[in-house]
Amino acid sequence: MGRPRVIVTRRWPAAVEEALAARFDTRLNADDHPFTGEEMAEALRSADALCPTVTDSLGANLFRPGMRVRIVGNYGVGYNHIDVAAARRQGIVVTNTPGVLTDCTADLAMTLILMCARRAGEGERELRAGEWTGWRPSHMVGSRVTGKTLGIVGMGRIGQATARRARHGFGMRIACYSRSPVPRAVLDELQAKQVSELDELAAHVDFLSLHCPVTPQTHHLIDARRLALMRRTAYLINGSRGPLVDEQALADALASGRLAGAGLDVYEREPEVCDVLPGLDNVVLLPHMGSSTAETRDAMGMRVVENLDRFFAGEEPPDICV
Ligand code: DGY
């Protein structure tokens, strides 16, 4: 066999594109246009490896018998956009990029916590609009972060990294809810307690931060009922996946003052955002940029390269999605 044929669906960091081109017969996406369904289907038919990103939808309908693709090397840790079971039925391996974006994504969760509690977006908008009239005791009064309770939903790598920053950097108290038991050593280090009911966590924390994947079980995990359980002074933070939250219900809670605020990096129907949210001052809205640092974006790409290298060398790639 000659060099494996690899198709990349978006522009990737230059160093990663070079690494791919050096190893494989690589087709890059020079103008960075989002692939249509037909382009995706053609890529699956004609390449040995397809390298999509988290915005490419690869549903069951795309994985048909007789395709050439053997591996889908996803650029991203989340893979809810790929029907992994359907791929597996066609003998296709799907890989992701865990580990390398933990710190940056946790940093962004802290950014959202600080921005919404301290009204940073609102303050900057006021200043840029030329509306700042000077210091006064009653101006832009937010909520203190130090000493407050942070509830983490999903204590995987990113949930733990966020909790560590909050506990050791900001003296926050940590509580968490997770599918599986969090190791005792982790809870001890964070002086954290794990609760068995999400409702209990939602009702008792000052900040509720989501760090779990989206699955049929976690879709709209935070709905109108759970939002109503939260304290009126609480903030919801979502840097994980948009569909974890019923966005319209959140917009209603924020607009009515039922919830103090929210910090969002992800949305239900990206890149669309529920039209109420941009008009509200008590929500911080970022454009899905948790992993967006030069170092991390390079590392994500190199992780894909490693998965492909190992796969085409006849070995098991390190990051197989199950
Ligand atoms: C991921 O990797 O899943 C992020 O959402 C994008 O970096």
Image (cartoon, helix red, strand yellow):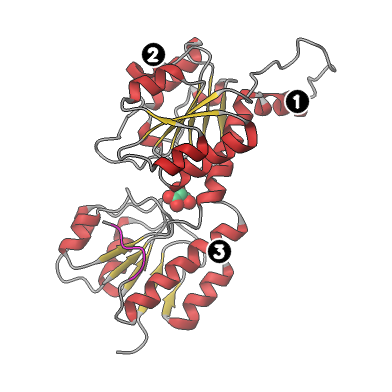
Q: Is mark 2 within 8 Å of ligand 1?
A: no
Q: Which region of the structure is painted magenta? A: 317-321
Above or below: residue 154 compared with residue 98:
above
Q: Is residue 246 magenta?
A: no
Say which residue label 2 marks: 228
- Amino acid marked by disc 3: Asp
Residue extending furthest toward the bottom: 1
Drawn side of residue 281 relative to residue 130, left or right: left
Above or below: residue 71 compared with residue 55:
below
Give the crowd class for mark 2: few <14, some 14-19, many >=20 residues within 10 Å: some
Main SS of residues in magenta: loop
The image quadrant of residue 222 is top left
Above or below: residue 206 compared with residue 35:
above
Give the crowd class for mark 3: few <14, some 14-19, many >=20 residues within 10 Å: some
Closest to the observer, 177 or 85: 177
Q: Earlier in the sequence, mark 1 or mark 3?
A: 1
Residue extending furthest toward the right: 134
Q: Earlier in the sequence, mark 1 or mark 2?
A: 1
Say which residue label 3 marks: 298
